[in-house]
Image: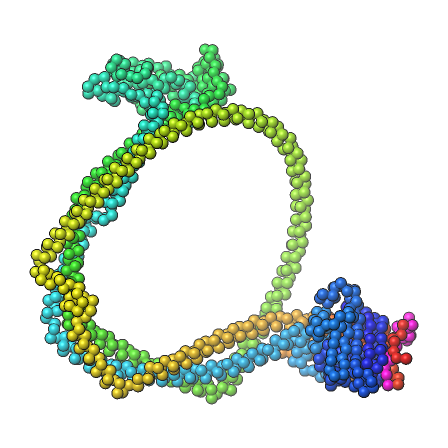
Amino acid sequence: MHIKSVVLEGFKSYAQRTEVNGFDPLFNAITGLNGSGKSNILDSICFLLGISNLSQVRAANLQDLVYKNGQAGITKASVSITFDNSDKKQSPLGFEVHDEITVTRQVVIGGRNKYLINGVNANNTRVQDLFCSVGLNVNNPHFLIMQGRITKVLNMKPPEILSMIEEAAGTRMYEYKKIAAQKTIEKKEAKLKEIQMIACKNDISKAQTEAKQAQMKLKHAQQELKNKQVEVKKMDSGYRKDQEALEAVKRLKEKLETEMKKLNYEENKEENLLEKRRQLSRDISRLKEKYEALLARFPNLQFAYKDPEKNWNRNCVKGLVASLISVKDTSTITALELVAGERLYNVVVDTEVTGKKLLEKGELKRRYTIIPLNKISARCIAPETLRVAQNLVGPNNVHVALSLVDYKPELQKAMEFVFGTTFVCDNMDHAKKVAFDKRIMTRTVTLGGEVFDPHGTLSGGARSQAASILTKFQELKDVHDELRNKEKELQALEEELAHLKNTAEKYRQLKQQWEMKGEEADLLQTKLQQSSYHKQQEELDALKKTIAESEETLKNTKEIQKKAEEKYEVLENKMKNAEAEREKELKDAQKKLDCAKTKADASSKKMKERQQEVEAITLELDELQREHASCKQQLEAVNEAIKSYEGQIEVMAAEVAKNKESVNKAQEQVTKQKEMITAQDSVIKAKYAEVVKHKEENNDSQLKIKELDHIISKHKREAEDAALKVTKMLKDYDWINAEKHLFGQPNSAYDFKTNNPKEAGQRLQKLQEMKEKLGRNVNMRAMSVLTEAEERYNDLMKKKRIVENDKSKILATIEDLDQKKNQALNIAWQKVNKDFGSIFSTLLPGANAMLAPPEGQTVLDGLEFKVALGNTWKENLTELSGGQRSLVALSLILSMLLFKPAPIYILDEVDAALDLSHTQNIGQMLRTHFTHSQFIVVSLKEGMFNNANVLFKTKFVDGVSTVSRFTQSQNGRVPKETNSKAKGPK
């Protein structure tokens, strides 16, 4: 953003509307005779930017800015500036859409003042925000360099030059606030010492008061102790007898507790066992019903018979084959059922005699085949044949059916008869190979249910979906085993309950005795506590405790008083020698500062090393990025391959869909059959559910009856025990019958809730006498005064803690900000120093300059000029000519401008102190170092304005200033007037 044109009307010496157009974006110069109004153009720019310090525009008030103070008929001054806003990077916030921004400020005699932005009224704040957003804060105008600035810079000392760097870095304001904060801390420190002294005085006064109170309390307690000791000795004998009786009862009570523990009886154990018995009974009933339901649903699973003769040994009948085996792997159930066939329902017995008796007199309900173990002979597959089969299809693919079931050893012959002559294979191919191999030629069954018989039989196809016979037998067996386990558990529980009953009886008797002794101990304890001796003894103990506390308080108060006096003396000395203390603290702080500077230098070296490491890591990062790009290309190739595979997957998916259709049709048929079976099963289950429900209700009723019987018997026992206990107490203690009607009555001898009224009255009278006696020497308002003093003291301590906390926070913040300030200052110094040397070399070719700390000091102590002409460094600036010194100061000023670049810079006769030979390089320097800023320079020297791209000349004609515009000629020396003159009054 730069100035395109300025329009003045009624402003200072510009009485009529004057338009100054055609400002160059880089270098503009304004010249003219003294008093012709050249500086008024700069003043008009500052006025429009919103300057508040009118002395910088050479005016005492706003009325001075109007032409002849409004006495020539002109009553207002107006300035309008048009800014080029085509560079959106430097555009003010909110004005990015405008290519031009026109700002107008107008002041009227009487003090009225208004702003316009693009013809729209705006307040002062909005205009300030507009310019501040692009670095044009006219009230802190680092872009404005007025006359005499060069001379002022030349006369600066090292700390003052450092302050310029601080101002540029933005840390100068922090220094001002830091000094103010330190002064505040000093005031707070003084206030803290005053608070501490007040606190010490309070501590001394409080300690003295507490010491007097403790002394009085101690003296009184010692006197009371002597009196009480005499009274206690008179009542000692009766109290000791009761105490011995209490100790005897307690010992007997402990003995009973030991005997109760030896029984190792838990009071809730019987209830828990009864609850467990009820649960087991419910489980057994449920399992029996389930077992009976399974038998009713599958009657073929049970082999029922009548004993053929008296004293019949049922162990001779082993049972059905299906009930005598256990399948090792459930996946072989189908094959094993096909292997065994109807033989699963054969009955195994020990001898043929047993079988004959069963058939003749056992009243069997259906036809059975009997397998007598002593007569049955079975042919089993030879081991050699098994090895041939395993070699043919693999050892894991073929098994003898007998090896797939578990059974008792005594049933070996029967099991060989049923399962010993058939192979079981995993699939049809293997089964076919095994069955029809000439070396084997044995019947073979697959896991899926296909049968291959070398004698010409082949069977297979879909099997029934109903549960298999072996699965049913396994379920029945599991229920039967669980039922037997629960019955055994219940039997063990009944035995434990019978044993526990005797222990419980002994425990209840011991507990009754223990409770009686406990009540007896409580009565004796109450009697002892209500006795006069006990009360006197308690008062005696309380007095001894009071004496000990008073002695301790007296000792502590003396120590507190001593420490407070010592602390008060130290604080008083510090207050008297505050200045010396401050000097000492300053010296200590200086030592710490020097140490910190040393650490800072070391940290600077480490930082340079770290920068080298960062450069190395950057190179490594570039290499990794290249590798990443290569991997990305490989990933793209893989993605293309995946796309081709996806096409193949789509073709395969179409084939799978066709196969699924045929599968779905088959599943629909299966589903219909299952629905029919499910409907029949649901009817059967509903009937069985009703039977189970009625049985459960019956069982619950039986259990409730048993529980109620148990509770009634328990209450009867407790009532009998209580009656025995009361009878015994009436027999042992005769006074109970005579005085039991007074128990618990208020104001009676047996009122256990209150003390003896007579003794209480005596104690009250003594306490009142003590109060009257102390009231003659003690201030009754002392407690209220003490409370107020303690409140003030607590408030002071609270404020003290707040101040100390704030101080620590402020010091920590100052330390942190000091580090950040030093870092920012170092960065600013390096940047300004670099630009300072570059600008000076441009203005004075062959020379060099820099800012360096004085010898033996650091950057934080100050900076001074170092100048070299050729290769010779000058000791100080006095060795330079006046013009050279002015160039040094100008270079520093311009390098400061570069640190925080602004879009516009205004220089008002800064070359006044320069030689003519030195001004010619200023134009080249501005083009080299300030490529994005516009310069408006007021000068009287040709060497300066002849190098400008555009030159404005002012003249004073008939009391009014005029302006003419010139552009630089081809030879760059003589300016020529352009056709587009600045408009002035006619």
**Residue at (33, 34) in percent of width and height:** 693
Residue sitting at the far bottom: 576
Q: Is residue 380 visible?
A: yes
Q: Position of residue 476 (x, y in %)?
A: 34, 27
Segment tinted magenta in the rendering: 959-979
Q: Is residue 215 left or right of residue 751?
A: right
Q: Quadrant of residue 373?
A: top left
Instruction: Left or right? Give the position of 188 relative to 507.
Output: right
Place of residue 436 in the rendered image (x, y in percent of width and height, measured from the top left): 48, 14
Q: Nearer the viewer, residue 510 or 938?
A: 510
Tell me the quarter of the image containing the N terminus: bottom right
Q: Is residue 598 above or below residue 306?
A: below
| Total tally of numbered discs in the picture | 0
What is the x, y in percent for residue 166?
Answer: 65, 75
Q: At x 63% / y 74%, what residue is drawn?
A: 171
Can you tell which quarter of the image residue 767 is in? bottom left
| Residue at image location 12% in from the left, 69% down from the top | 239
Q: Which quadrant of the figure has residue 364? A: top left
Decide whether residue 966 is among the magenta residues: yes
Q: Is residue 517 magenta?
A: no
User: What coloring was used for the rendering?
Assistant: rainbow
Q: Is residue 854 visible?
A: no
Q: Quadrant of the C terminus?
A: bottom right
Find residue 388 and report its horizontal and vertical position in percent. 45, 18
The residue under the point 21% across, 38% down is 495
In depth, the one of 977 and 771 nearer the eye is: 771
